[in-house]
Amino acid sequence: MILVAFQGSSIDGSVYEDVVNSAQQAPGWLDDTVSVWSAYGLGVFAVLMVVGWWRARRVGAEAALTALAVPLVVVAVYGIDTLLKSLVRENRPCQSLHVVTLEACPARGDWSFPSNHATIAAAAAVALFFVSRRLGALAAVAALAMAVSRVWVGVHYPHDVVAGVLVGTLLAFGAMVLVRRRPKSLARRITAGRLRPLVVS
C-alpha cells in the first residue's frame, strides 16, 4: 500500500530555510565547493572501496572477500532506500517552499525521503569500518559532509539526511555482520578457482 506523502516542511522546514538562506549569503567559493561535493562526492567512496580491497588482498583471502562485499552491500542498501522513497513519496523541500537553491530542484516524482546520497555515504562508511578502521573513519567524515551538503544545496530537508544516515548505518552494519560470519569456506572456493586474483595479491 502506498503511503500518503507527509509534509516535511512541518517537521523542520524552518531549519531548512535557515540553511538555504545561509548558503545564499555564503562566499562563492564555499558554495561552489559544497555543490561539487554534493554532486560528485560519492565517487570518493568508490575510490575508498577500491583502496580497501587492494590493501585487504595483502592481508588474506578472507579480508579481501570482506572488502569485495562492501560495494555489494552498498548497492543493496541503495535498493532498499529507493523502495522506501517510493513508499513515503515526500516532495522535495524546494518544491514545497518558496526558496532559491544552489542546485536545480529535481522534478516532481523524484522523492526526497530518505536521502539516497546520505544513505549510500553512510552505508559505505559503516561497511568500510569492517575492512579498515582508518578508511572507515575517513569515510564517516565524508559521509557527514555529504549529508550536510544535500541540505546546503537545497534538495533535502534535514530529516531526510538524518533518516538516510540511519538507514544506511543500520542496514550496512547488519549486512556486514552477516558477511563476516562465513568467509572461510567461500575464500577457499575462490582461491582455488579463476577468481583467485581478486582475493590474493
Image (cartoon, rainbow, N blue to C red):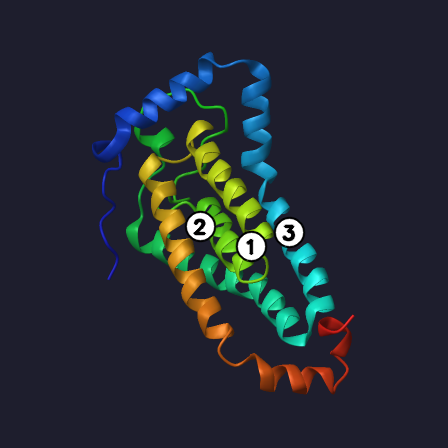
Q: Is label 1 or label 3 in front?
A: 1
Q: Residue at x 50, y 46 (%)?
A: 140
Which of the two discs, 1 and 2, labels the residue nearer the N terminus?
A: 2
Q: Is residue 158 among what the camera can see?
A: yes
Q: Is residue 161 left or right of residue 196?
A: left
Which of the two discs, 1 and 3, labels the residue nearer the N terminus?
A: 3
The alpha-carbon separation of the residues under discs 3 and 2 comes to 16 Å
Give neighbour class at mark 2: few <14, some 14-19, many 20+ (Cα, 10 Å): many
The numbered dot on residue 133 is: 1
For mark 3, give the secondary structure. Answer: helix
Residue 43, compared with residue 15, is above or below; it is below
Q: Is label 3 or label 2 in front?
A: 3
Instruction: Look at the image and tell me in which quarter the C terminus lies.
Output: bottom right
Residue 128 image point, x, y percent: 55, 57
The numbered dot on residue 119 is: 2
Residue 59 occupies quadrant: bottom right
- Residue corresponding to mark 3: 48
